[in-house]
Structure formats: structure tokens, C-alpha cells
Amino acid sequence: MNFSTGMEIHGETESAAQALALHLRRSRRTVVLTGAGMSTECGIPDFRSPGSPWLANPPMPFDQFLASDEARREAWRRKFALDDHHKGAAPCAGHLALAQLVQQGRVDLVITQNIDNMHQNAGVPADKVIELHGNGTYARCLDCGTRHELAACRRMLEEEKRAPHCEACGGIVKSATISFGQAMPQEEMRRATLAAREAELVLAIGSSLVVYPAAGLPLVARERGAVFLILNRGETGLDHEASERFDVEAGPVLARLAELLTQRVN
């Protein structure tokens, strides 16, 4: 990680990393909540920025997806258009640093609103990641739950000119993400809420903290005495609720944080 992009930025990065290191050293149970800003440094677009490809290919509401084969074909077309936009994206410095903190036992659990599988790709064990909004790197049958790989789904769409269907039961196949209007995953929400209740420190990274129920998790933790910190460029919906917030790029801060805590371990 290069910290030589300017003295002022370097100073902000170092100050934030030092403060976070102090908090993590004090905490016996740290939970991290990540949002789209965690992955924008990897070239994966968020939903709200001007020019985002999501604006040209908006997610289809769940009821509309179910309504017809034509709607499902369009939803899949949008899905693959978005995938093509960030094809080849890899975990960035922030993901890798966070994975290191998990491996060191500094971070107990990562709760993510992202659907890009970047935390797992960076080395965070799957059982240490809770995906509140699902995972966009594969698909599932809505009827029997069978997993389907995206390559096969794309062949059905582009070569057979039909919406992907389940080869096991014939049911509707959908990207394994949570669409607008679709029920939140109960087990993931249960685990995330329990983790928030047990946390001594919750660090929100790269999230606008305006989408619920995910944004409510830091409040659950804070109400039970946890420290709530925000690392995000720009304002969030919970700035007034945080113990401390850092308006700095997440990747360099997390990379430096991992360095500081590794030095402490050694």
C-alpha cells in the first residue's frame, strides 16, 4: 500500500489508523459491517454515485421478477451487463487487510451488505462472513434451493434465449441476492443481530448506513454498551450516533491498521 500520495492525506490516514488500532486493542469482540464503499476501490460500482452502471441497469423488484419469463430475461440481462462492467475485479488493500485482522483474531466477524464475494476472495473464512443481501457470484432455484453457476445461467439466456430454470426441479432460478421486496434471509439476520448484541466494538466501513435493517445493527450494539465507529468517505445516516467517525479512504487506513496491529502482535 502506497501512503505517499500527499502529506495531508498521509496524516489523515495515519491518525485514523492509530485511533482504530487503540480501539481494536481494547475490544475483546469486534464486529465489522461493510458496505459498497468497501469495494469501490476495487472498481466495483456503488448504487448511488453519478454515472454508476446500476442506474442504467437497475435491480428489478422481486415481484416483477416473478411476474413473467420476459421480466426474468430482462433481469438476467441487467445482471450480466453489470457483471461485465467489473469483470476481473479483485480484492483491494482494504479487503486484504481486513482478512488479515480476522486471521489474527482482531476481528471476530464481518457482516456485509455487499454481494461481490470479495471478503471470501481476500481470505476471510466463509463462516466469518454474514451476507445480509446475498451473493451475486452464483444463483439458486427459488423452489428447491439448488445452486446454479452463472456460466450455465448465461448460456440459457444468451444461447437458448430463455430465462434460466432449475435443471433439478424446473423452478425459477435467480441470482442468490436479495432483491427489493424479497424477504431478508432469516438465519443471516439472526446471526448478525446476535453478533451485534455481543460486540464490544462495531466498525462500519464504506456504508451510507441508510439501508435497514443492516443500518440498525450498530444501534443494537451501541444500546448494549458497544463502541460504534464509522470509517467512510462522506456523511452517513448514523454520523450523530457514532462514538467517532473517520472521513478517510478505507483501503489505506485498513492497510495501515493491519500493519500497526501486526507490530503489536510481534
Image (cartoon, helix red, strand yellow):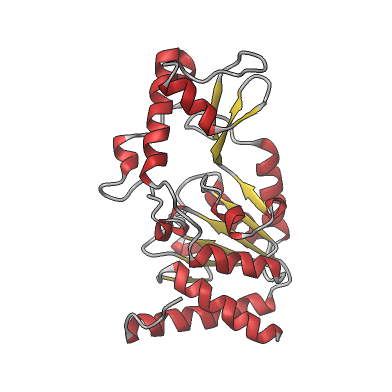
Residue 45 can be seen, yes or no: yes
Q: Is residue 11 above or below residue 171?
A: below
> Is residue 80 rendered to the left or right of residue 187?
left
> Is residue 145 rendered to the left or right of residue 67?
right
Residue at point 38% right, 65% down? 233
Q: Is residue 253 above or below residue 219?
A: below
Viewer-proximal residue among 198 and 140: 140
In percent of width and height, residue 192 lies at 66, 49
In percent of width and height, residue 5 lies at 33, 80
Q: Is residue 182 above or below residue 229?
A: above
Total numbered circles: 0
Residue 228 can be seen, yes or no: no
Residue at point 58% right, 32% down? 149
In percent of width and height, residue 244 lies at 50, 72
Viewer-proximal residue among 128 and 1: 1
Q: Quadrant of the C terminus?
A: bottom right
Viewer-proximal residue among 218 and 135: 135
Viewer-proximal residue among 69 and 186: 69
Residue at point 46% right, 68% down? 251
